[in-house]
Each structure stands twice: as structure tokens, then as C-alpha cells.
Image: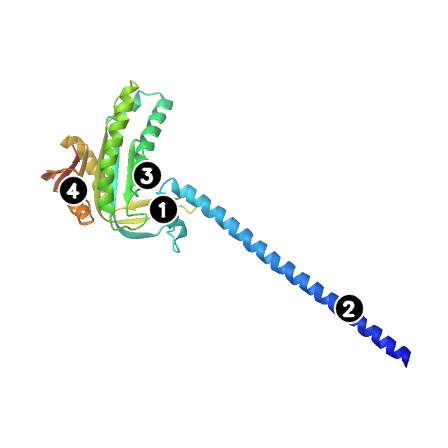
Amino acid sequence: MGVTRDYVAYMTSNLILIGAEFDKVIAILLSTAILAVALWRARRLLVQSVIEGQAHHDLGRFFAPEIAHQIVSAEQRIEAGQGQVRHAAVLDCDIRGFTPLAMGMDPAALMALLADYQSRMVAVIQAHGGSIDKFMGDGIMATFGAALPTETYAADALRCVEDLGQAARDWRADRQSNNDAALDVGFAVAAGPLVFGAVGDGQRLEFTVIGEPVNLAAKLEKTNKVELVTALTTAETLAMAQAQGYQEPRPLEIRVARPVEGTGGPVDLVVLLP
């Protein structure tokens, strides 16, 4: 009987030890599983952070930083073939007499000229919340309120023109001081409803805008040469900007019922920069 009791006690003790070891194993396995899940989640967050960081970097080449952030973090993103109606402003910039100048320039010097010009203009545009839609040779097309809606799109665009004019004058002075050909830049702004969307084949996407303000801004920029001024907008766009808080830095000249090629009728023009 004593042996039996000792054996039972021995077995009971072993079972208790085995149970304790089993609990340790379970605890280790649970800890390992929890650690594995935590590492997986941390890796996923790291990868997502890297991807979003790259997206910020890429978008930052086209949009102001705060706009790039909002596009990346938006729950619904525009895909190819989709578009949205926005109320926005379109700004066009163009170098005067660029085509004949470019024909006689060394290619490297030509590209350096464009890079200098574009870096100066783009910095000002983005400082005012504008987004670069496209570069077209010496032309720059920018939008305000298209990439993301704003309540001050027209006002922002007209304020931007003031600073662009100063940037263009500084560029001209710098070129003259280096004995380079002095160049002038023309500007135009038109605002109203347009379609903002992405076009492409799925592998490469490009944000773009389509609508009357796009066409009108291009026509107004060409009209600068006819009107012998630096920057034009329409009385309608000026009224929009004023309603959005824009204050004229100086009395602006309004030229009533002026012909603008391709518009189908006279347009009331506003001289932003003489």
C-alpha cells in the first residue's frame, strides 16, 4: 500500500510538472504568435508608409505639398476614365518670341533655359496652391481648385499672376545681367466649371482638365499680344475672384467688348499686368 501511495504521489507530481511545462509551451507559442502578428503588422505599416511616402514625393512634383497629401490620403481616388465636375481656374504662361529663339539655340542651352524658366514659374504657382497640369514646350498650364476643390480658386489664380509677373521681371533682369537675350512672359486666367479627371492606359496616368476655361485661358494668352499687355483675364473671372476675397493691388483696366479669336463673340477683358 505504501508503494502504491508513493507511486501515485510520484505520478501526480510528474503530471503537475508536465502540466506546468505544457503551460509554458503554450505561453511561448502564444507569445510567438502575438509577436509574429505584431511584426507582420509593423512590416505592412512600414511598406505602406514607404509607398505613401513615394506617392507624396511623386505627386509633390506636380502639386503643392498639402494638395499631394490630400490626394494620397483621400478615400476615393480618381482612376483612368473617370472625371468630376469642378469649379476651378486655369492659368497659362508662355514665353514671348520663344520659337524663333529656340530654332537657333544649342539643344543643351535651350533645355537649360527652359529648366530655369519653369523652376521659377512653378515655385510661384505652387506657393499659391496651384497644380501643374502640363508643360507644353515653353508653355505652362496650371489649375487652381481642380485637383482638389477650393472656395478661392479664382482669387488664388489672380494673386498668383501678380507674383508671376515679378518672377518674370526678375528672370528678365538676371538674363540681361548675364548678357543673355531678355525674354518676356505672358499670362492669362479663366475660371468656371470644368471636368477634372485622369487619362491614360492604366500603366501611366495623367491628371487633366477639360472645359471652356481651359480653351479660354489659351485664347486669352494669345490675345495678350494683340492687346499689347502681359496678363489678361475676363470681367467674369475678376468678379468671381472678388467674390472670393480678391482685392485689386491697383486699379485694373477693363477693355469692354474686345475680340478674342475663337470665342464667337466680344469679351470684356481685364488687364492684370500692362
Residue bearing mark 4? 234
- Residue 260 visible, this orientation: no
Q: Which comes before the other along the chain, label 4 or label 3?
A: 3
State how many labels appear.
4
Q: CA distance from mark 1 to mark 3?
A: 19 Å
Query: Circle 4: is it few (<14), some (14-19), or many (20+) Cα within 10 Å?
Result: many
Helix, strand or loop under label 1: helix
The residue tagged with tag 4: helix, strand or loop?
strand
| Kind of residue sitting beneath label 3 | Lys
Q: Is residue 231 left or right of residue 107?
A: left
Q: Nearer the viewer, mark 2 or mark 4?
A: 2
- Which of the two residues, 144 or 212, is positioned nearer the viewer here? 144
Name the disc covering residue 17, or none: 2
Which callout, 3 or 2, points at the residue further toward the start of the chain?
2
- Residue 188 visible somewhere in the drawing: yes
Relative to residue 177, is residue 222 drawn left or right? left
